[in-house]
Amino acid sequence: MSAAPDSPDGPDATPPRESWPEHPPRTEAADALTDLVLTTFRLNARLMEAAQDLAAAGGLTAAWWQVLGGVLDQPRTMAEVARKMGVTRQGVRRVADLLVEHGLAEYRPNPAHRRAKLLACTEAGYWAIRRISLVQQPWADRVGTEVGADDLRTALATMRRLVDVLEAPEPDAGRAGVRDGD
């Protein structure tokens, strides 16, 4: 009888530290990326705190604001909102159902696909977004002015490049950074 994978004697048991493989030498770029990732985690936490505070002005949560923001310009399927916002389809579905329940969005028939309904913003949803924008704009003006437009554009270009690299297929599909979908 073999040991369970998570038992001390199983194949996933933690070996003694002295038998752990050595890391290959790190490049300067790898160190810079690691620092960027750790700083991004911290920035994400601060931005989510700010988003929660700003969204409250419209009676929304940050997650509700994010999903509603995905359909402000046109109705979209759950998959389209998920891709646009960089979140999972299941997460969009949960939030969309709440938005519909609260009258901030509605489901519409999709002429292109019978089963994939479209999510659309209602007038109440647009009003919630307008109320948020009244506090978000002064916040963005203050933070943006403090950081500077040139630095923000440079950061945005770098972030977009990183997204492109991380979303591109890798030659070795077993490595981190490969997205298998939503």
Image (cartoon, rainbow, N blue to C red):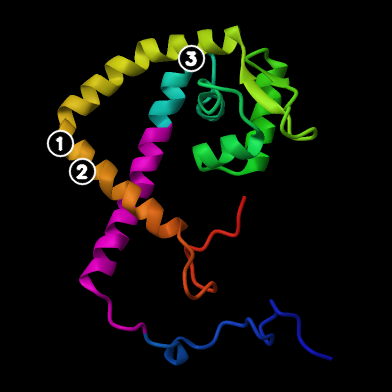
Residue at 68% from the left image edge and 15% from the top image edge: 102
Mark 1, other Cα within 10 Å: few <14 / some 14–19 / many ≥20: few
Q: CA distance from mark 3 to mark 2?
A: 28 Å
Kindly identify which numbered label has been placed on residue 26. Answer: none
For label 1, the SS is: helix
* Callout 3 amino acid: Ile
Q: Which x, y percent locates residue 181?
A: 61, 54
Q: Along the polypeptide, which appears first: circle 3 or circle 2? A: 3
Residue hosting label 2: 154
* Callout 2 amino acid: Thr
> Is residue 141 rendered to the left or right of residue 109?
left
Q: CA distance from mark 1 to mark 2?
A: 6 Å
Span highlighted in magenta in the image: 23-48
> Is residue 137 rendered to the left or right of residue 180?
left
* Residue 130 sits above or below residue 11 on the image: above
Residue hosting label 3: 129
